[in-house]
Image: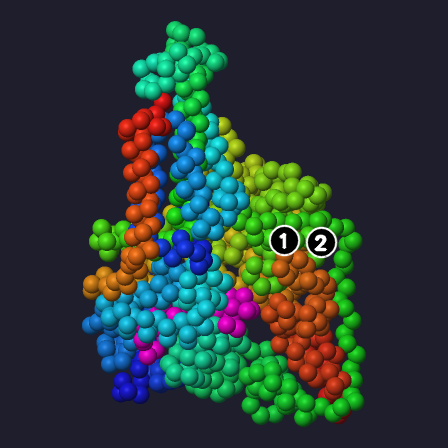
Amino acid sequence: MAERYPAVLEHVTFSYEGADRPVLDDVSLRINRGEVTAILGSTGAGKTTVAYALGGVIPNYIRGELKGEVIVEGLNTKDHSLHEIAQHVGLVMDDPEAHIVSFTVWEDAAFGPCNLGLPVEEVYDRVNFALGATRLDGMRMRNPYKLSGGEKQSLAVAGVLSMRPSVLVLDEPISMLDPLGRERVRSVLKDLNEKYGMTFIFSDYDAERVVGIADRLVIVDEGRIVLDGECHEVLQQTEVLEEAGVHLPESTQLAARLRQDGFWKGDLPATIEEATSFLASELSVGQYVRAKGEETHDRVREAVVSIHNLHHEYAGGVQALRGVDIDIYAKEYVALIGQNGSGKTTLAKHISGLLKPTNRGARISVAGLDITQAGMREVATKVGYIFQIPEHQLFCSTVSEELRFGLKNLGISEDESEARVAEVSRELGLHGIEGELLMSLNRGKRFRVVLASVVAMDPEVVIVDEPTTGQDWRDSLYVCGFLERLRRAGKTIIMITHEMNLVATFATRIIVMYQGRVLLDGSPRAVFSKPDILRQTWVQPPAMTRLSSALSEYGMPSDLLTVPEVYDALMRLHRRAG
Amino acid sequence: MVLMEYEDKETPIHRLSALAKFVWFGTVIFLFTLYTEPRPLPIVAAEVVLVGLLARISWRKLLSRAWWAYLGSIVGGLTVSLWITTPAQLKRIPAEIGVKILLEITPEGTPILGHRAVTYAGLLWATALTLKVALAVSAACVLTYSTPLSEMVALISRVLPYKVSFIIMAGVRFYPVLMEKVQTIIDAAKSRGWGTTSRNPVQRVRSVSTILFPSIREAMGLADKMSLAIEARAFGTTKPTALKMTKVNVKDVVFMLMSISFAIALAFMWWQYGFGEL
C-alpha cells in the first residue's frame, strides 16, 4: 500500500491538550504518489492539524489525544521519532523564518544532512540538489535572513528537501508572500513535482491560489473532510465550498452566477482562460455595452494626509523612499500596493509618525498636524495603525483591558472610554466576550480586538497593514467591510495589501509603489487598465479585469473589477443579443 | 549584534581561515593590554588598516556604525585620565613632566573626587585609550566583516560540544529576528499612545512591562517553532558531519606567523625598552 499511497490518515481524530472538542474528527485520507493535493478550508477548520499529523509533528512534538493511524511511507507516526519521519515527509511551516538556523544559505540547507551524520560527499550532493531544485544555487553564501520572502520560503523547502523526503507537506506556503514571492514558490513546487515526481500536500484557504498546481482538492470544515476529489470536479460544488469558507476562483464564482440564469452551460471553469474561451464562444463580435462610469465617492477635496518631498534612508544606506509626494483626501479608501521592499510600509510608518524623514525638506501633515514635529501621543489621536500580526499588538490579558489600552494612554476619561468601547464592541461583534482572555480567541477575533482598540481611539486615518495575514477569506472580507463602513462615516482608510480581489472590491484609489517611488496613482479602473506598467511590480490586475479585457473585442468594457460588474455586463450583452 | 556583518567577498583576508583571523585579532588585543601611552599605536594602527584595506572593508560604513564607541572611548579616556596625577603611576616619563598640572579640575581635599587635574601623562593615557578602543573596534569589525559567523562558531565548536556551540549559533541568529519583532511590538504600542516619557522610575518600569509581555510571548513562540524545525531536521540524533570549514592552509600559517612575529617584536620593545609605557 505504501508504494501507492506514501501518506495515509486512517480514521484520525485529534484533540489538542486541554481542548474540549476534537480539531480533527474521523478524518481518512490517502495521498497518491506524485500527486499535488491542496487542503482547503477556513481558519480553524483543521488544515494545519492535518499537515502536522502527516509531518509527524503530531503526536511527536505537539501533544494531545490522537485516535486512528497516520502512516507515512509505511511508518506509523506513533512509533517513529520526528527526525525518522522527516526523512520521508518534509514539513514546511507557514513562517519560513522559523526554519532558518544557519548563517548562509548553503549551511542552512546542509543542516539536516549534517545532523544525520552522512558522509561529506553525500551532504554536498544533497545540498546541491536541494539548492538547484529551489533555484537558490546562486545565493549559496547569502545571509538567509536577508533573502526576500519568496526566497526564504524556497530555502525552507530546500532545508527539508535535503533530508530527501518523498513527500512535502507545506502549511500555507504562499499566504504571507508578495506576488513575486508567490510566483517563485509556485513555480518551484511545480518544477519539483513535474521534474522529480515529488508528492505535495499543501494547505490554503483560497482556491484561486492553488488552481494550476493542485491535482486534487480536499475540503476541510470543522475537522471533517467534506469534499475530496480532482480539482475541476470539486470546484463544481460551489455551495459546499462557500459553506466551508473557501474562497472560490473568481471565474468559478462568475460562471456559477451565470449558470443560475441559464447563460453558462456545462462545467464551471477553474481558470480565467477556461472562462474566456467559453464566453468568447457565446458572445458575438460587434456587440457593445457601455462601461459603467467611475463611481463618485463623495470625495471632499480636502487633503487629510499631505506628504511632500519625502525621502527615507535606512541605516546601511538602503534608500526606501525617494521623493514621495502624495495628497490623500477625506473619505478615501486607499490601497497601497507593490512588491515587498517597494516602500509601502516605510511610507505608512511615516504617516503614523513611527519613522521620521531623513531629508531636510520633507513635509508630512495629517489632519493639520505636522507629523514630523509631533509627539507619538498626539499622532495617535490622528492616525491609527494596525499591524499585520495581531499577536504583536496585544498588550493586555483580556479583551476588555485591550480595548481600553489606547484610550488609557491618551488620558480619555472613564465615561468616555466606556461609551467608545461599547460602540466598537457592538460594531465588531465583540459584545459578550469582553471578559475573555485574548489568547483563548482565534486569530480572526484577535484581529478584530486590535481593530476595535484602534478605532476606539477615534483617529482620522486608519492604516491597516495586510488585513488578510493569518485570516481566512470571510474574516478578511469582514475586516475590509468594516473599514468601508468607517470610510462612509468620514474616516480615511489606507490599506497595504497584496490581495487584488480586495483592492478591486473596496478601494477607491490605488497607489502603486515601486523602488521607493509612486509608480501609479489613480482609481482602481485607471490603475488596473495599465497592466504593462504594473508588470514591473509583479502585480497582476484582478481576475475579472483580465477577463473583461480579454473579452473587450466582444463589446465588454475592459476595465471591470469585480464578479458582479462582469456579471451585469455579460447579462446586458446576453439580453441585447437575445 | 555585530557592527559589521559578514559580506561575501573574494579578498585575501576573506579567504583566510577563521583561526588565522582569530589569532591576528588576539595579537592586536594582546598588544593593547601592554600599552599605556600612544607612541607604538600608529604602528599597530598601520597593521589594522592594512588588513582592513586587504579585506576591502568600507571605512565610511565602519565609522557610521562605530562612532559611538569612538566617542565613548574619548569621553571615558579623558575622564579616567583625570585620575593620573601622582608620580607612582608613571614608569618611564619623568614625574616633573608627567604629572605637571595643565588644568586643575578639583582642588586637593575635594570630598569623594579628591584632587583631579589634566596632566601631560593623563592626556597621553587618554589618547592611548581612545586609539586602543578605536583600533580594537576596527579590528573586530574587520574580523566579523571577513569571517562568516558559522566559521567562527565552527571554530568555537572545536573547543565546545556541538550542542553548546549550536545553541550559541542559534542565539546569535535568533537575536536580529527577535529584535525586529520586538521593534514591531514597540511601534504598535507607540501608535496606540504608549510611551516612556515619565521621569518616575516606577512609572517607567510599569511602562516597559507593557511591551515585555508580548515580547516574551513572541520569543517563546519563535523558539518553539525553531525547536520544532531543528528537531525535524534530526538535530542531536547522531554525531553530526563535520564540514571542516576551518581548514588551515599555508596562507593561514604564513598570516598567523606574521601576526605573531609582529606582536612579539613590539612586545619585546615594550619589555626591553619600555616602548609604550607611561
Q: Label 2 amino acid?
A: Ile
Q: Which residue is mark 2?
A: A326
Based on the picture, tell me whether residue A176 belongs to the magenta stretch: yes
Q: Residues within 10 Å of mark 1 (few under 14, many from 20)?
A: many
Residue at figure coordinates x 24%, y 56% from the top left:
B162
Residue A386 picture location, percent across and down: 55, 53
User: Between marks 1 and 2, how big is the CA–CA gap?
Assistant: 12 Å
Q: What is the x, y in percent for residue A65?
A: 26, 67
The front one of B6 and B278 is: B278
Total label count?
2
In the displayed structure image, the side of residue B34 where residue A337 appears, left or right: right
| Mark 2: few/some/many CA within 10 Å (<14, 14-19, 20+) | some
Q: Nearer the viewer, residue B221 or A390?
A: B221
Chain of the residue under label 1: A
Q: Which mark is residue A321?
A: 1
Residue in the image at 20% along x and 63% along y: B239
Please tell me whether mark 1 or mark 2 is closer to you in this view.
1
Bounds of the magenta segment: A157-184
Which amino acid, mark 1? Leu
- Picture quadrant of residue A197: bottom left
Can residue A273 be seen?
Answer: yes
Decide which of A420, B29 is in the foreground and name it. Answer: B29
Seen at 71% across and 49% down, the residue is A309
**Placement of the N terminus of chain A among the 4 image quadrants:** bottom left
Give the letter of the chain under mark 2. A
Q: Is residue B101 above or below residue A172?
A: above
Residue B1, how many percent across, how many down?
41, 46
* Comes first in the chain, label 1 or label 2: 1
- Are circles 1 and 2 on residues that touch, CB within 8 Å? no
Q: Quadrant of the C terminus of chain A?
A: bottom right
When asked about the image quadrant of residue A54, the answer is: bottom left
